[in-house]
Image (tube, rainbow, N blue to C red):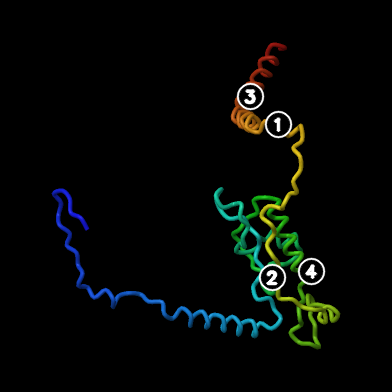
Amino acid sequence: MGFRHNNVLHANHFRKDWQRRVRTWFDQPGRKLRRRTARKAKAATLGIRPLTQLRPAVRAQTVRYNRKVREGRGFTFAELKEAGIGRKEARGVGVIVDHRRRNLSEEGKKVNVERLKAYKARLIVFPRKAGKPKTGDSSPEDLKAETTRAAIPLPEAYPAESPRKITAEERQFKAFRALRVARANQRHEGARKARAAKKEEEEAAKKK
């Protein structure tokens, strides 16, 4: 530790019994084992039900991370309606509902509707009483079918595209120029409409 210039000398405190205040992590292996046994016990109590509830596939936030697809909080009412699942029914069959989320794109909505339909096709609803099935319960044939607890995987963030040659049309296309023209058209749209309306009024006045 060096001392330079005309500054106050450090008042270093080295007599604080710091070893008594250190946070140790010696119980990490034990905790790991406890968590593992707890997961096993939970899986055993769930029986043949899926280990996790179904969540939607959403894009991560901001331009930096939106290339990544992750699980969201819950499905929107619009997605449930299109997939033919009721709001209250969804909670009973392991589908999480989020009343705050909104669909901002048709593509994202379509992905989640397909996800719900795939889950619904695999779903087997056992009756509470074996002899008295209710509406919504699976048929006796479906009850005998093989069950799986594997979760429905998330879709690919970007579907892999096989390599191909660049076409002549693609070579001639100027992406930067197209963007600039589109922005300019959007910026001047109001002024152009106002100018056209004014011109029409002047022509109408001349005809009178």
Task: Tell me the amino acid under the disc marked 1.
Answer: Phe
State the mark number for residue 121: 4
Closer to the chain start, of discs 1 and 2, is: 2
Quarter of the image with the C terminus is top right
Task: Tell me the amino acid under the disc marked 3.
Answer: Arg
Q: Are marks 3 and 4 in contact (CB under 8 Å)?
A: no
Q: Is residue 148 above or below residue 165?
A: below
Q: Are marks 3 and 2 in contact (CB under 8 Å)?
A: no
Residues at marks 1 and 2, CA–CA distance in whole angstroms:
43 Å
Q: Is residue 2 above or below residue 17?
A: above
Give the quadrant of residue 110: bottom right
- Which residue occupies the foreground of this view, 204 or 73? 73
State the mark number for residue 173: 1
Q: In x, y percent, where is residue 93?
A: 70, 73
Q: Residue at x 65, y 54 (%)?
A: 103
The local crowd at label 1, few if under 14, some if 14 to 19, many if 20 or more residues have their Cα within 10 Å, is few
Q: Are marks 2 and 4 in contact (CB under 8 Å)?
A: no
- Which residue occupies the foreground of this view, 72 or 97? 72
Q: Residue at x 15, y 57 (%)?
A: 9
Q: Residue at x 61, y 30 (%)?
A: 180
Closer to the chain start, of discs 3 and 4, is: 4
Residues at marks 3 and 2, CA–CA distance in whole angstroms:
54 Å
Closer to the chain start, of discs 1 and 3, is: 1
